[in-house]
Image (cartoon, coloured by chain):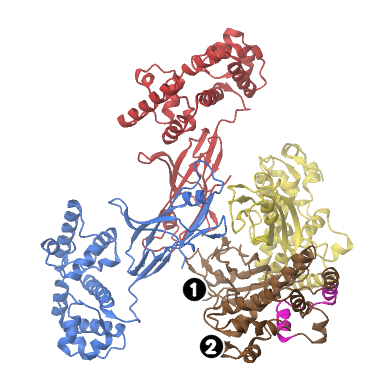
Chain colours: A red, B blue, C brown, D yellow
Amino acid sequence: MPAVTLAELNGADKSGFVAMLGDIYEHAPWVAERAWARRPFANVSSLHEAMMAAVRAAPAQERLALINGHPDLAGKAALAGTMTRDSKAEQASAGLDRLSAEEFAHFHELNNAYRQKFAFPFIICVRRHSKDSILRQFEHRLGHDASTEHETALAEIFRIAALRLDARIKTTERLKVHGHLSTHILDTHGGKPAGGVSLELLELSERADPRLIVSGVTNDDGRTAEPLIDERPLPIGRYELRFHIGAYFARLRVALANPPFLELIPIQFAIAEPEGHYHVPLLVTPWSYTTYRGS
Amino acid sequence: MPAVTLAELNGADKSGFVAMLGDIYEHAPWVAERAWARRPFANVSSLHEAMMAAVRAAPAQERLALINGHPDLAGKAALAGTMTRDSKAEQASAGLDRLSAEEFAHFHELNNAYRQKFAFPFIICVRRHSKDSILRQFEHRLGHDASTEHETALAEIFRIAALRLDARIKTTERLKVHGHLSTHILDTHGGKPAGGVSLELLELSERADPRLIVSGVTNDDGRTAEPLIDERPLPIGRYELRFHIGAYFARLRVALANPPFLELIPIQFAIAEPEGHYHVPLLVTPWSYTTYRGS
Amino acid sequence: MPAVTLAELNGADKSGFVAMLGDIYEHAPWVAERAWARRPFANVSSLHEAMMAAVRAAPAQERLALINGHPDLAGKAALAGTMTRDSKAEQASAGLDRLSAEEFAHFHELNNAYRQKFAFPFIICVRRHSKDSILRQFEHRLGHDASTEHETALAEIFRIAALRLDARIKTTERLKVHGHLSTHILDTHGGKPAGGVSLELLELSERADPRLIVSGVTNDDGRTAEPLIDERPLPIGRYELRFHIGAYFARLRVALANPPFLELIPIQFAIAEPEGHYHVPLLVTPWSYTTYRGS
Amino acid sequence: MPAVTLAELNGADKSGFVAMLGDIYEHAPWVAERAWARRPFANVSSLHEAMMAAVRAAPAQERLALINGHPDLAGKAALAGTMTRDSKAEQASAGLDRLSAEEFAHFHELNNAYRQKFAFPFIICVRRHSKDSILRQFEHRLGHDASTEHETALAEIFRIAALRLDARIKTTERLKVHGHLSTHILDTHGGKPAGGVSLELLELSERADPRLIVSGVTNDDGRTAEPLIDERPLPIGRYELRFHIGAYFARLRVALANPPFLELIPIQFAIAEPEGHYHVPLLVTPWSYTTYRGS
């Protein structure tokens, strides 16, 4: 679906409007249809509000149908290839398209338990989660009562819609749906940024090996050319940053022990706020280092 | 062999003396026998000097026989169970008694290459090394010339003897053959030592999984009851200290993110001086930490 | 008054006992006299308890007389030279013997206000306070009611007595009446303790210039030969430690800016627990430093 | 003198050009006049180059006259009010218009010694220096030989000219003649920037009391609204940043000692590169802090 401007949306008739936004809510073009009446929209935020208001104002049965229109996580729809393109991309973002047979069976079991208790599918904005975090949410939300879980499902649908709107609408005044993860290495031995340091970011899992997210090399300002994660929510989960600092000091011909006291510096940390700004810097000498959640 | 005092040694006749120290040098009781003439010994250091002097004063052929009296590292003597008790314990300390078939083959190959080049076995004071470090030394020393390697072999034999003497002689004025590794956790969020923190020390290897050396829990002073390594040389190698800090702050009911920003703190460092004092402390809050080589 | 052992005290008759301890409580030998009945004393702590019990068991009038037997702080007794030797030394410890005319007038005014409200002198264990802290206590306690202040005065008398007992009795099992202030400098540029660094400890005051308490030079282990303060309570107050780190790195011929980024490092901190252990270390490179309350 | 654009300069005839830039070199409109021939100038940097080339190409006598056209530092011209407006403002920037009688006498003496040795006035780009640094330069340069000092005087004149050009020419592609000093406070107790912290920057002097440069309060991002120093060279010299951190943690109702361990945090540092970027941040808890030269 191509991106559109607010001007195009505000100028469209109802059918044109629905053509442009009918798929923001999964299998529920009526949400766009009813929001159309509230145009013009000064910004994407008021458009998002109007669509959420249309959902909230809908009869209970329609809201339930909206919830039921969503596919199971890593479920049969995925296998059968009948998911919407957006759902497919979203589930892939958390690696749900690359499950082992064991993991698939585990999801299947949780999906069944959830459907049996609540009679609708488990909905979660997967872009905001790692696989471990989705499983924790699954187990946690299975303990809710039906009314809480109905509300939670709608809240997650709104988060999914917000991310889809953000990707669809061309505008500078964007929704706050993205997070930011960056690092910086300061060489406090030399009193300057540490350039040329190789580093990796890995996602950690209780059940699987670390998964490489991104690798890079710091520039003269001690930063990576791009943020480590940007322009998307930060998946809730545990991570490890690895800094190859031994090679850096060896290149500078600094006096080192043999083998050098510090070679690889691993820093494990968790992301809890997908829309947050996380800065995880390193202050380092050949004999010491400091890290912290910066801003 | 039971421990003896300097008084007992100084009071012994030659055969008694050799009975007590004849095995300090592998299959070479003549070293003790010749050192006997230099008694009395004011301290273990002068005894060690006297025995080294006896080796240095011996004819070249005898020195070579001494070298040749040593078993191969992880070699046939180990398989056949014909090593001296001391050699056996020493090789076990670096895990040479638990080699995989592949590792055994690698050692065998290196032993042969070394014997072929120098015509005597590769001798190293294994208590001062990890398995990785032994292999690095092996490869490094294969590049030496014969005369350098002859000197190196004797130097390693003297280190082995020093450790055996230190274990054999009861005295307060000991040889400096041991190192010391300790840690300390300071909670700079609360301004006090962090007690009750679980931690582990692991040996890292390029070829194998991390191997647990010791685990413990910090006391009210933020220290382990015993040093992490003490009363032995620190094996040259790479290590990881793991601090379970998430559980500590959770117990204190400090406000934390969910999941907490810091849960497990891994610190990787290398030991390069087997007789050194290494203090690797942690200054920590729920959002930051600092580590360094202390003293 | 010479120091005595517990054995001498336990073996003394009543008059001998009073001769040895009659001055522990100011102008109140009856406290020692009545505690005598409780001998023998297993340690100085039970002796201290027995003397406090004697005070608590005394009639109200006697307790009031005990309080009234104490001199004003920086008062007429000091001018007239009629204070006991102990009181004189104690008041000198906080600099109350070196007051400016203005300060003297201020104390005089506070003494009068206190006496007018409570009809007894202001008593405080001055060894536990700096001049600033005494003034803050004076102002704070003037707001108390009479009964609270009566209790506070006795509690301070007991603290004074504990310190006098600790100085009088020769024993290894001492009262916990002393604090400890130390520092340590670690050069995280070189990975070793920073020896040969000049440092000063100053007492800060809101009303006066900083006052030098002690200066020193670190040894090879990065510590001062003696703790900065030891064998006395740490006076509650604000302090500054000054580390002359520029000269240290210049001596090591480390590459530095001109002028060097760090030359003098001042660290201001407060002591709140006179009987506490304060360790205020410095981790330092030519471009960075860290300090903290250690243990 | 009003600011001009490169277009205006490139379009001007010779007399117009000299009217606009004739005072960039002190009492030497001929520099602008000769640079005019090299127009058009693509940017201010090539204009600066052209003017410097004109000076370098001038006969020795003219270059000497240029040097002699400069006033003494804090000299008679200042007293008599006969300095150019630019020189007056420049000397004021380092406090040379507020000298004590003693300081004035000291400058007078140094000026005379310098003139006596070199037969021209001591020239220095004062905006790049504090008063202490100017005096140190004075003493240092008195030790030079005549030829070195002739070159140094011209280099300083070029620096003065660069700053004047930067102020005169309206352009986005500016000369690198300014530095930048900033700070940032991160509360590693709470894991967030420390907002609402009062701070001051003072210039330190060996001869005088600290002089307040700027004070401020950090915003929600832990920074001051404006950099501490910006849009000018950073004067070489020693500084102290003072952070009032006690009040910050007290406001957050964090558990603190009484008095709090940390109240005022003073950080002393030197600036050595007037065109450098200095970032001097603070990582702080109620019990610890870290500072460093950042970037």
The label nearer to you, 1 versus 2, is: 2
* Secondary structure, magenta segment, majority class: helix
Circle 2 sits on which residue?
C7
| Upstream in sequence: badge 1 or badge 2 | 2
Residue at horizontal 25 percent and vertical 85 percent from the top: B50
Which sits in the foreground, B44 or A8?
Answer: B44
Which sits in the foreground, C113 or B198?
Answer: C113
Q: Is residue B185 above or below residue D112?
A: above
User: The disc numbered 2 marks a residue on which chain?
Assistant: C
Quadrant of image for the N terminus of chain C: bottom right
Q: Is residue A124 above or below residue A261?
A: above
Q: Is residue C97 magenta?
A: yes
Q: Judge from the rendering whether residue D187 lies leftward or rightward of residue A245; answer left or right.
A: right
Q: Amino acid at mark 1?
A: Asp
Circle 1 sits on which residue?
C221
Quadrant of image for the C terminus of chain C: bottom right
Q: Secondary structure at mark 2?
A: helix
Q: Is residue A294 above or below residue C85?
A: above
Q: Magenta stretch: give its range.
A: C84-108
Q: Residue C45 in the image: x percent, y percent?
A: 57, 77
Q: Residue A282 in the image: x percent, y percent?
A: 51, 51
Q: Amino acid at mark 2?
A: Ala
Q: Residue B104 in the image: x percent, y percent?
A: 18, 55
Q: Judge from the rendering whether residue A24 lies leftward or rightward of residue D277; answer left or right.
A: left
Q: Is residue D260 above or below residue A8?
A: below
Q: Residue A137 in the image: x percent, y percent?
A: 46, 32
Instruction: Evaluate whether residue D74 shows in this view.
Output: yes
Which sits in the foreground, A172 or C212?
Answer: C212
